[in-house]
Amino acid sequence: MSFDNVCKLLSEKYPDRFASWVLGTPQPVVEVLKTELSIEPIRADYVTLLQLQGQILHLEFQTRWDSNPPIPLRMLDYWVRLYRRYRLPIAQVVVLLLPPAEETVIETTFVMGETRHSYRVIRLWEG
């Protein structure tokens, strides 16, 4: 049995101890989740290879900023899938076709914990 398989087995058997050890604080209540991470198919609006630059250009055209899942999370999801497939740098742009409600905050970065992912936003009505 390989070392990683032994670690997987022990971490599933003693999840509270592993979480406490890694995080450095007691974790008395933990729940072991499924380790299989299924990927639902999604389609990007526009993806092209810029051969001279050696990078991928990904565009998403939006009429509404509100979406489920939220656009920042979707852009991270697209980036991970594109990078996994092509292993090239990726330039991402959301093209907003219509202005959102006045109080709407248009985010250009997904931030959750230590994860940070940025993309550009073009507001078409601004010229």
Image (cartoon, rainbow, N blue to C red):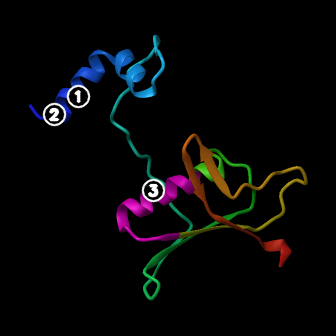
Is residue 11 depicted above or below 29 in this figure? below
Magenta stretch, main secondary structure class: helix
Residue closer to the observer: 27 or 82: 27
Of 122 and 89, nearer the camera is 89
* Dot 2 amino acid type: Phe
Distance (Cα) linking label 3 and label 1: 26 Å
Q: Residue at x 46, y 11 (%)?
A: 28
Q: Are marks 1 and 2 in contact (CB under 8 Å)?
A: yes
Please state if 101 lies on the left or on the right of 34 as rendered.
right
Left or right? Give the position of 45 relative to 2. right
Left or right of 32? Residue 106 is: right
Residue on which the image places disc 1: 7
Q: Residue 116: where, in percent of width, then height? A: 58, 51
Determine whether 29 is above or below 24 in the image: above
Count the numbered circles shown.
3
Q: Which mark is residue 80?
A: 3
Residue at position x 85%, y 74% from top?
126
Q: Quadrant of residue 96?
A: bottom right
Where on the picture, by quarter, is residue 114?
Answer: top right
Give neighbour class at mark 1: few <14, some 14-19, many 20+ (Cα, 10 Å).
few
Q: Nearer the viewer, residue 26 or 42?
A: 26
Q: Amino acid at mark 1?
A: Cys
Provide the residue span drawn in magenta: 74-90
Residue extending farthest left: 1
The residue lying furthest to the top in this view is 28
